[in-house]
Image (spheres, rainbow, N blue to C red):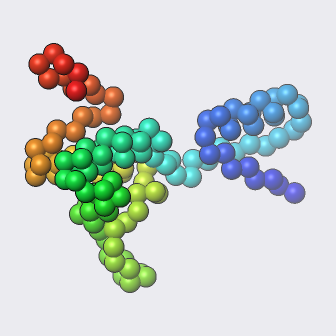
Amino acid sequence: MTELFIIRNNAQRDNVTLFIRETKLPFKIVVQDIRPQRSLDLNEYYWGVVVKMISDYTGNSIIGTHRDLSNMFRFSYSMLDASIGPKSTTTDNNKEFMEYIDKCCAFALEYFNICIPLPNEVIYNDNHLL
């Protein structure tokens, strides 16, 4: 009988690898990257910086701001299941999610004159940290 282990992060992979080395039992391992998901850091940046800065400026709630951004930049129509609405970002990988974030940041700059910093970017204004 074949056992299937789904490893969702590097720590789990390291634990399984250590277990296999220590037990010295014959194992067959197949490593397959089914679909890389977006990182937690990028998710925190989206909610904590991008959505928050736009929300603070507009006075809209964080959830409302996220909904509005999704409606603007993630709206889709599927003829397969006749669904209309924003596509969830939960299945995006980092590249796809960053493309969405770039659209949100460009929108904020164009319509609200909000310059949203990039991840890990520090903005100074007249030698003061913002």
Residue visible at 37% across and 66% down?
87
Q: Nearer the viewer, residue 10 or 112?
A: 112
Residue 99 visible to an observer of this rendering: no
On the rendered structure, is 52 left or right of 108?
right
Percent from the top left, x then y, of residue 22? Answer: 85, 28
Check the image and name the residue furthest to the front: 59
Residue visible at 73% across and 49% down?
5
Residue visible at 27% across and 34% down?
118
Q: Quadrant of the C terminus?
A: top left
Q: Quadrant of residue 94?
A: top left
On the rendered structure, is 128 left or right of 50?
left
Q: Quadrant of the N terminus?
A: bottom right
Residue visible at 87% across and 38% down?
26
Percent from the top left, x then y, of residue 34? Answer: 56, 52
Q: Nearer the viewer, residue 125 or 16?
A: 125
Check the image and name the residue furthest to the top: 127
On the rendered structure, is 27 left or right of 107?
right
Q: Quadrant of residue 10?
A: top right
Residue 13 visible to an observer of this rendering: yes
- Examine the rendered structure and indicate whether residue 84 appears above or below residue 27: below
On the rendered structure, is 17 left or right of 54?
right
- Examine the rendered structure and indicate whether residue 88 appears above or below residue 106: below
